[in-house]
């Protein structure tokens, strides 16, 4: 294999890793605040902020995950579930940072 091909492949892998990292921890702008924040918890907030704002979860799932190929960043992926009135909130955390907030409303 030529050296140029390997360099291109390495750049492509770095590019893919960058896309994965951007998906995990998106940059929040003022226009996006309403899309990624729920009850004063936003993507990128620490676990302390989550507990202070939302309290203790009803259910927690935890597993060891790895980002990138080969493994570039290893940590715990947690899913915290909250039940509020007629809604269920699922908050995902990676290495003690909020990465996603999902709200499901009961019919």
Image: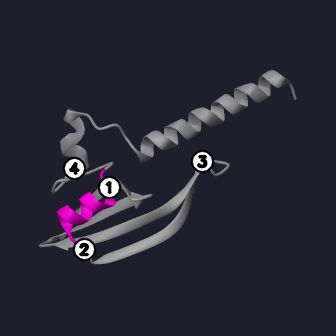
Cα–Cα gap, marks 2 and 1 = 14 Å
Answer with the quarter of the image where residue 64 lies.
bottom right
Give the residue number, with chain letter if any, for mark 1.
46
On the rendered structure, is 61 left or right of 53?
right
On the rendered structure, is 3 left or right of 106?
right
Where does the image place residue 107, in percent across and percent down from the top left?
17, 70
Q: Nearer the viewer, residue 67 or 104?
A: 67
Give the residue number, with chain letter if any, for mark 3.
68
On the rendered structure, is 105 left or right of 10?
left
Count neighbours of disc 2 (C-alpha within 10 A) and say few if under 14, some if 14 to 19, many if 20 or more.
few
Q: Are marks 3 and 4 in contact (CB under 8 Å)?
A: no
Q: Quadrant of the N terminus?
A: top right
The stretch of residues the image draws in magenta is: 45-57
Give me the residue at 79% from left, 21% from top.
4
Count neighbours of disc 1 (C-alpha within 10 A) and say few if under 14, some if 14 to 19, many if 20 or more.
some
Where does the image place residue 51, in percent across and percent down from the top left?
25, 66
Decide: is 100 above or below 86: above
Where does the image place residue 55, in percent across and percent down from the top left?
21, 70
Give the residue number, with chain letter if any, for mark 2.
56
- SS at badge 2: loop
Give the residue number, with chain letter if any, for mark 4.
37
- SS at badge 4: strand
Give me the residue at 27% from left, 78% from top.
58
- SS at badge 1: loop
Q: Are marks 2 and 4 in contact (CB under 8 Å)?
A: no
Count neighbours of disc 4 (C-alpha within 10 A) and say few if under 14, some if 14 to 19, many if 20 or more.
some
Q: Nearer the viewer, residue 2 or 94?
A: 94
């Amino acid at each position: 294999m030529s050296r140029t091909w390997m360099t291109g492949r390495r750049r492509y892998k770095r590019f893919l890793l960058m896309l994965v990292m951007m998906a995990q921890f998106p940059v929040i702008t003022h226009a996006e605040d309403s899309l990624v924040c729920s009850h004063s918890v936003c993507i990128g907030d620490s676990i302390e902020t989550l507990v202070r704002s939302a309290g203790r979860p009803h259910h927690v799932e935890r597993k060891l995950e790895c980002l990138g190929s080969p493994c570039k960043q290893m940590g715990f992926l947690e899913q915290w579930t909250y039940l509020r009135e007629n809604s269920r909130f699922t908050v995902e955390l990676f290495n003690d940072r909020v990465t996603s907030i999902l709200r499901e409303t009961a019919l």
